[in-house]
Amino acid sequence: MSSLQNESAAKIFVLEDDLWYSQFLSYHLSTNPDHQVEVFNSVEEFLGRLTEAPTIITLDYHLPSVTGEEVLQQILQKSPKSYIIVISGQEDIRKAVSLMKMGAYDYIVKNEETKDRLWSIVEKIKHNKSLQQELEVLRSEVKQKYTLGSELVGSSEPIKKVFQLVEKAAANNINVTITGETGTGKELIAKAIHQNSRRAKMPFVAVNIAALPSELLESELFGHEKGAFTGATARRVGKFEEANGGTLFLDEIGEMSFNLQSKLLRVLQEREVTPVGSNKSIPVEVRIVTATHRNLMDEVKKGNFREDLFYRLLGVQVHLPPLRERGHDIILIANKVLKDFCKQNDMEDKTLTAEAQKKLLSHPFPGNVRELKAVVELAAVLSESKAVTDSDIQLQSLAPTSSSEEKTLDEYIHETVQRYLDKYNYNVVYVADKLKVGKSTIYRMIQKGAVLIPEQKRY
């Protein structure tokens, strides 16, 4: 949140015709060195400076030449984002309510408690303003993250067609089906559609159908009542209710059981869900985006997927091409991944050498973008200079070996750590620093036997 301003900072205008009291307020507010306080005894001079948009204004209600209401109206017109605190010599509840309805932030009376009350209100305003700024930054970051052309990188013809379909899908509420191999970025496309649609301010809820047992999936989607089954100790809201008004992303929809497909079809037709253990239906209004690596039409022909549900979900069809068909997009994506990784990990900027790029382009990337991201991030860690070379690009364990044996990501990481330990005389602290990982992580690998180190060499 480096773009946020100091929460303690504030520009404060004091409009007060009583010279002594204006000095009293100025002195008190200026005890915080981050406050920039300016005092005005003239209404004309004060109104002429409102273009500076002060954070906070203290307004004396009883001015000699104009009413407090008139000045308040002009402030609201010329500096609508300023917080206005009205200070009056008389306690008048009706007047306070009226002024706050007009747009004043608060109303306080001149007495022995004024100083403390004013300080408390100013601190509250600064805190609220800081929270608003933080929320605006977060919204901007989320919007930027999923804006077409920021995360969805590429200039190849296949991906350009995807961009066109995504833009069309985002412009309306039609259902969307996203297909493509594992790792091509189906959820990223779903989020981009949501964030660029009219539903952007409403929830985006993702459910991985393949990750949940079929007996739990119904409760996950539709919710359940207390006592609906063993372990249901309280009512639970389902994902359809969570996503109400927004987008529900059903990933790996092809893995859903035939029985649950029937219930999902009913929800889509009736636009209402019935939680497990309940006889009451709850209206829901959601946009459905589905994704699968399977050919659903083939699954329909095999009898594994309902034909009526297939057509109900179909909508706009977005097919994500595998990375091996996207040509130079591999380098564009790799450069972005490298830049983002260095920024997120406070590392100096790095670039791919021509040899490194050539090595990436020669690889088929069966894991698609997900695999490319893992390869580039590891290369950034292994690189010992600003240039990521072809020797930093580790591809062999991400593809089948000559014996067709596949390795897990953990095995790949353990091999890298073992290689560095062997190279640097088993100095765990030094290797941890080189790989930018905690030394405790390496010690856990040693304890589990995932990496080997001679007893006499343990530091």
Image (spheres, grey):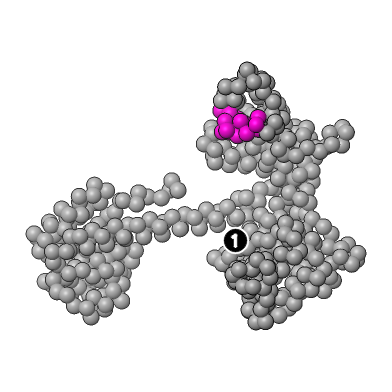
Q: Residue at x 8, y 59 (%)?
A: 20
Q: Residue at x 70, y 32 (%)?
A: 450
Does 416 appear above or below 14?
above
Does residue 156 appear left or right of residue 198 in this picture? right
Does residue 349 appear left or right of residue 102 in this picture? right
Does 353 appear above or below 164?
above
- x and y, in percent, of residue 138 in the image: 49, 55
- x and y, in percent, of residue 381 in the image: 62, 32
Q: Residue at x 60, y 55 (%)?
A: 146
Does residue 95 appear left or right of residue 274 in this picture? left
Q: Is residue 137 visible?
A: yes
Does 195 appear above or below 383?
below
The residue furthest left is: 20
The residue furthest right is: 302
Number of disc labels: 1
- x and y, in percent, of residue 133 in the image: 41, 56
Depth check: give the residue in front, 217 or 374: 217
Magenta span: predominant SS is helix
Depth check: give the residue in front, 59 or 296: 296
- x and y, in percent, of residue 434 in the image: 58, 27
Residue that numbered label 1 is attached to: 195
Q: Is residue 169 visible?
A: no
Instruction: Look at the image and say whether residue 342 sits in the magenta stretch.
Output: no
Depth check: give the residue in front, 289 or 266: 266
Q: Secondary structure at mark 1?
A: helix
Crowdedness near tag 1: few (<14), some (14–19) or many (≥20) residues, C-alpha within 10 Å? many
Q: Which residues are magenta?
A: 432-447
Quarter occupied by residue 108: bottom left
Instruction: Look at the image and say whether residue 435 sits in the magenta stretch.
Output: yes
Q: Residue at x 62, y 34 (%)?
A: 444
Q: Amino acid at mark 1?
A: Gln
Does residue 226 appear left or right of residue 367 in this picture? left
